Image (cartoon, rainbow, N blue to C red):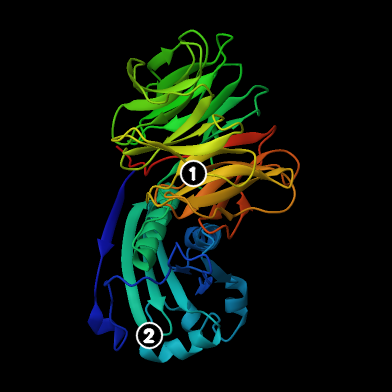
Amino acid sequence: MFIVLIVWAAAAVFLNPAPVFAKRDYIDIDNPLLRKIPLAIPLCVPMSGSADELDMSRILTDFFVNTLRLTGYFMIIDPESLEASALGPQRPARKIVLAHRDFPDWLQSGAELLVTCGISIKNDMMDMELRLYDIYRKTLLMGKRYRGHKKDYRKMALRFCGDLAFILTGSRWLFETKIAFVSTSAGKKEVYICEFDGRDPTRFSFANSIVLSPSWSSDGRWLAYTSYMAGRPDIYVRNLKHKGGSVISRKGINAFPDWFPGRFAFAATLSYSGDPEIYLLTGDGKIVKRLTYSKGIDVSPSWSPDGKHLAFVSDRSGTPQVYVKNMASNQVRRLTFDGAYNASPDWSPKGDRIAFSGVKDGRFHIFVIGAGGGKAIQLTRGSGNNESPSWSPNASHIAFSSSRSGAYRIYVMTASGNGQHRLTLLPGEQTDPEWSPVIKKR
């Protein structure tokens, strides 16, 4: 892939709207009462008017609209309505660079933010020129140009979406991430991997058996998962690139791997000593130490982002509940008290909250609770079961599996529970989502 990025700050061109690169939190991803920002994305301008540019104009506009709508943070103003309005072909909608006099027209459209785009294609190479404006402040927030092969338009467009997210929130959101999940599309439960928006689902495991609980290493190079390929629950560790790895196959249960932050090691449940307990293992399966000690069943470990605490599920109090262990003091405290069944904890990458699934009114729902305890907040409601929450690497979104539409599918919502939408629609059912860290091309 060949992509060149150019950033400019041509203040003289913009009269009053000068470029601004200072951080301002337009979007507080932790605000549960977040209002969606009206965002206008008019059709990309084909600079020469060639057939290739006209086709790509529509493709790119649709891509930006669908991708930024997926985040749950924007109310997208329909590009077609902009074309049919006073902002039509001969008006500011067709401008890439806005002058001071153009902003009142955009204010009438209801937009608060505006993305403009121009494209040039020659000999299979494409230049994309994009700008982000704050309409109310009459300010250019960002201007960038990307150059690459036409076939790489998606990668270039995602670069801009990530840059836009950084300007508005200080985080690049989820555009360079993937999601691993379990699907029965091939008849058996296997691990699949898709892009953050559900595109390009690809089968990763070929156990032809039951596979569960995929877990990404913090560098994004390894996946660990539970497989019954040998007729019992073993843990398989596989490299994403060359598929080599190891198998942890002790007597009894070997399940629920969760990678230690920044190390080639993970926590997992083993029962070779008789009682299912959680252990710390190296990536090739050597036991480092035992982490839990109880007569109950201890499963589903989840590390805090600094590795100083471990959340897990135990029935030591009589019913499955979420507990937290302090690794320095070895003290264990119960985190959840509401409900008779709470499971699948996943620690927020920010370290402040833990998502989990719990039973309420006979159905599983997704909750979040402060890492120090307190009142759990319910994020999902309605019909069907909602299970297996997994945070995005910047804690802005949560993936989960839901049977609200009948068969289990993977869904995504913002961290406050807004913008819930289906991500997968494959044959069979999809469960056990696991969000990757940011994956850079090497």
Q: Nearer the viewer, mark 2 or mark 1?
A: 1
Regarding residue 433, the answer to whether it shows in the image is no
The image shows residue 184 at horizontal and vertical percentages of: 65, 28
Res 230 → quadrant: top right
The image shows residue 103 at horizontal and vertical percentages of: 43, 87
How many marks the image carries: the answer is: 2
Residue at x-position 65% and y-position 29%: 185
Q: Is residue 120 above or below residue 158?
A: below
Q: Is residue 219 above or below residue 52?
A: above
* Sooner in the amino-acid sequence: mark 2 or mark 1: 2
Amino acid type of disc 1?
Leu
Query: Which quadrant is the N terminus positioned in?
Result: top left
Q: Is residue 359 above or below residue 245?
A: below
User: Is residue 272 left or right of 423 when viewed as pictured?
Assistant: left
The image shows residue 182 at horizontal and vertical percentages of: 58, 31
Point out which mark residue 138 bears.
2
Residue at x-position 42% and y-position 50%: 372
Res 208 → quadrant: top right
Res 407 → quadrant: top right
Q: Is residue 266 above or below residue 437?
A: above
- Depth check: 167 or 66 in front? 167
Residue count near mark 2 (Cα–Cα under 10 Å), binned few <14, some 14–19, many ≥20: many
Regarding residue 14, the answer to whether it shows in the image is yes
The image shows residue 76 at horizontal and vertical percentages of: 56, 69
Amino acid type of disc 2?
Lys
